[in-house]
Structure formats: C-alpha cells, structure tokens
Amino acid sequence: MEKGLAVAQDCWDFAHSLRMRSKYALFLAFVVIVFIFIEKENKIISRVSHRLKQIPQSLADANGTDPALILAENASLLSLSELDSAFSQLQSRLHNLSLQLGVEPASKAERTEPEPGPEEEEAPVAAEPSQPASAPRQQRRHVLLMATTRTGSSFVGEFFNQQGNIFYLFEPLWHIERTVAFEQRGSSAAGSALVYRDVLQQLFLCDLYVLEPFISPVPEAHLTQFMFRRGSSRSLCEDPVCTPFVKKVFEKYHCKDRRCGPLNVTLAAEACRRKDHMALKAVRIRQLEFLKPLAEDPRLDLRVIQLVRDPRAVLASRIVAFAGKYETWKKWLAEGQDQLQEEEVQRLRGNCESIRLSAELGLRQPAWLRGRYMLVRYEDVARSPLQKAREMYRFAGIPLTPQVEEWIQKNTQAALDSSGIYSTQKNSSEQFEKWRFSMPFKLAQVVQAACASTMRLFGYKLAKDAASLTNRSISLLEERGTFWVT
C-alpha cells in the first residue's frame, strides 16, 4: 500500500517536473525568437540610419523637413511607424522639389500623385502660380485722335500729351499735306488718304524717319529745325530728345518751356520706343475705312477716338481762325446778299457728309473695328472734361495718372480765356456755346440746311429762329451720355 502511494507520488512529481520544464522551454524559445526579431530590426534601422546620414543637410533644409521627424539623437529613428511617416513626407517633398527644378516631367508627377480624399476635394490647397523672371510690359496702345479743324482737338490732345508714359505727336501729317499736292475730290482724295494712312502706320511703329522726305528743307544727318509744332509734343522737348541749345540756330517751332537744339529724329524714335504707349492727333484723316489695315496689323493695337463738334460752331470758329480762306463767306455776310455761292455750300455739305459716314461706320462696329472706336462730342468734353478724359483713357486701356487730372483741373477753369486760336487754357464750361451769340442766324440756317443729317446723328438741335439761337435757356444739345462709347 505504501509502495503504491510512493509510485503515484513519483509519477506526479515527474509530470509536474515535465510541465515546469516545458514552460521554461517555451519561455526560452520565446526569448530566443524575440532576440532574433530585435536583431533583425536593429540591422534594418542601422541600414536606414546609414542611408539617411548620406542625404545632404542642405537638401533637407531646402525641403523644409523637420529633422526631428528623420533622426533622433542616437542617429536612429524612434520607431518603425515614424520611419514610414518620415519617408512618406521626405518622398513627397523631394518630388515637389524635383518638379520645381525641372528634373521630373509634370506628366509623370501627375501619374504618381495620390488620389485626393473627400476632404481634399472639398478644401483644395491653392497652388502657388509660377512667376516670370520679370513682369510683362503693359499692352502697348496706339491711340489716334481723329478730328477736323476747330473741333477742340488741340485741347483734347493735351489729355494724352500730359501723360508721361505716352509718346504724343501733334499733327505730324501736316508735313505731308504741305509737300504733296492733292485735289480734294475723286481719286486724288483717295490717293491722299492712302499716303496719310501709310505714313500714320509707320509713325505708330516709331519709324519717325518716314517724315524726313516731307520736311522742308530735308533734314541733314537726321537733324531738323522745322518739325511742325514740336513744342506741342512734350515727348519731343524732354530728355534725352532735348539736346543742348545751339546758338544762332533758329528753330521755327521751338519747345515752349525749355531751350533745345535742333530735333534729332533718331533720338525721338528711340524715345518713342521707350514709352509704353503712342498717341497722335490728326485732322487730315477723314475716311475711317482707310484705317482697316492699321486695325488688322498685328504689330499695332489701334484705338480710334473720333472727335466731333456742332457744325455751326466749327464754321463760326473757322471764319475767325482762317479768315483768308473764308473771304467769300465774310463778304456774303457783310453785303447782305441772299444767295451764297453754291461751291461753298457744296464744300460745307461734303465735309459734314464725310464726318457722318465715318461716324456711322464706327457706330455699326464692323468686325475689324469692334472695340476700337469711340465717338466723342467736344461739347461733352467741355462740360465734363475730367469725366470724359477718364472715359477715353478707359476706352484706350491706359491708366489715367494724377498729373493729367491736375492739368485738366488747372486748364479748364481759367478765369479768362488765353489768347491765341490754338490755346488750350479755357473756361471750358462757358467756351463751347460762345458761338451762339456771335453767329448771324442766316449763317446758322445755311449750316443747318447743309448738315441736317449729320447734326441729327450727333444730337445737335436745329435753331428755329434767331431768338432760340441766342437764348441760353434753350439747349441745342441732346443728352447722349456714354452712348458714344462703342
């Protein structure tokens, strides 16, 4: 009995010993496996750390990666999860840098970019636009102030002459008219328009040498003392075009505010190219359709501003300014004759029709002229000069400077009108209707009969009698507002 109990006790002890040994064995096996994994992890971390140390520090700085996310103090990563995060961030930044340096094509970058998640689609990050090496120059405009004599074109031209970034020329086509003789009608008139147009095109391209064959006497070595109304173009009287004054050399149309030497056409052409924009005034361009090649020239960005005025006021002003050409009219008024020579009436009617046809073409806005034509009445400019100046500059696509605004304020509110038929210093709000109180009614009747259709188009009312002509409370001007900007 006791032996059986002893054997059972031994078996139990043996089984217990086996269980304990198996536990220790399993524990030792687990420890060995853990050590094996730790050793492999240390080898991986060591290799990664070695490669990270080879990355130039400047590259890490260029990408803006936080060093704490890459390397710990012992030159190893804090954990494998941080390693994955750091590698992802570093890969993304290296990818962006390669795109900026042009190393990797954009098409490849688009293929490797991860798909945006819902949150990214709802709140996309705005990409920073690439900036050119230098800001592009503003689109160069070429402004033609198209008018006829005594319509206030000298005054309106100063709106562009006073702006420093505009190269302005005052009546350069005067030289062509003085040199080349044309008839006023028929094919000869068309021939003169073609010559004017071709010269105008070259002038807009800053080829001022095109004027030299028409200047009398012809310039020598590109120097001339006879550039028409040079003093009315600021660009021709400022540095470096204004060369040192030469004693005993007479310049017919000298600069107003400073003494300059003879005009150097080469320096003037260079100054024209340096300016942002080009503008000129011309009273010798009558047919708008002849400007089509200029509007279609890819080298030009043409803007045409046609300035018109009440034909009655124009004739009253011309009789005073050009007395020699209007002797027939003055004689008719003085002698009280009932009939005026038909030739004079036909010339007046032809001038009005030419202006009307050009304006109607512009207002129809053909494809080649669309966005390039603006019709302005002198009376509107005289009443609201600053407002109209802003409209014209806005139409031309040129910012208006405070210097121009200051000039307009100073020169349109003069207490007394300056003397001279070409004066630009006036009390403009009172000036535009002065003709009504000096024009005989029978002269107004002739103009109204010859130019009725033109006056209706531009919004000029007919005077029924002498009393309505001189009655200031009766307006002869229809309100048209900005209808004229096409």
Image (cartoon, grey):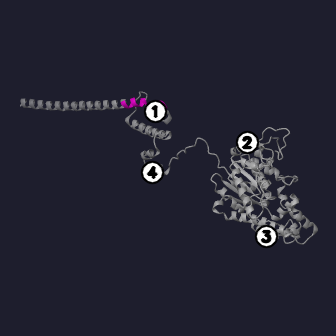
Write down the region rendered in magenta. Answer: 47-60
Instruction: Out of 105 and 113, give the one closest to the viewer.
Output: 105
Residue 448: x %, y % from top left? 82, 69
Query: Is the residue 214 above or below the residue 332 in the image?
Result: above
Q: Residue at x 24, y 31 (%)?
A: 27
Q: What residue type is labelled 1?
A: Ala
Residue 391: x %, y % from top left? 72, 56
Instruction: Out of 328 and 358, give the one closest to the viewer.
Output: 328
Crowding around mark 1 (Cα neighbors within 10 Å: few <14, some 14 to 19, many 20+) is few
Q: Which of marks 1 and 2 is nearer the N terminus?
A: 1
- According to the picture, the residue beneath numbered tag 4 turns out to be 118
Q: Which of marks 1 and 3 is in front?
A: 3
Q: Which of marks 3 and 4 is in front?
A: 3
* Quarter residue 295 falls in: bottom right
Q: Kindly report the distance in space between the C-alpha atoms of the residues bearing marks 2 and 4.
A: 63 Å
Q: Element type at marker 2? A: helix
Contact (Cβ within 8 Å) of mark 2 with mark 4: no
Q: Which amino acid does label 4 sit on?
A: Pro
Is 346 placed left or right of 83 in the picture?
right
- According to the picture, the residue beneath numbered tag 1 turns out to be 68
Q: Which amino acid does label 2 sit on?
A: Leu
Q: Which of marks 2 and 4 is nearer the N terminus?
A: 4
Look at the image and tell me in which quarter the N terminus lies: top left
> How many numbered marks does the figure carry?
4
Is 20 placed left or right of 433 in the picture?
left
- According to the picture, the residue beneath numbered tag 2 turns out to be 267
Q: Kindly report the distance in space between the C-alpha atoms of the residues bearing marks 2 and 3.
A: 48 Å
Q: Element type at marker 3? A: helix
Contact (Cβ within 8 Å) of mark 1 with mark 3: no
Q: Kindly report the distance in space between the C-alpha atoms of the residues bearing marks 1 and 3.
A: 87 Å
The dot on residue 452 is: 3
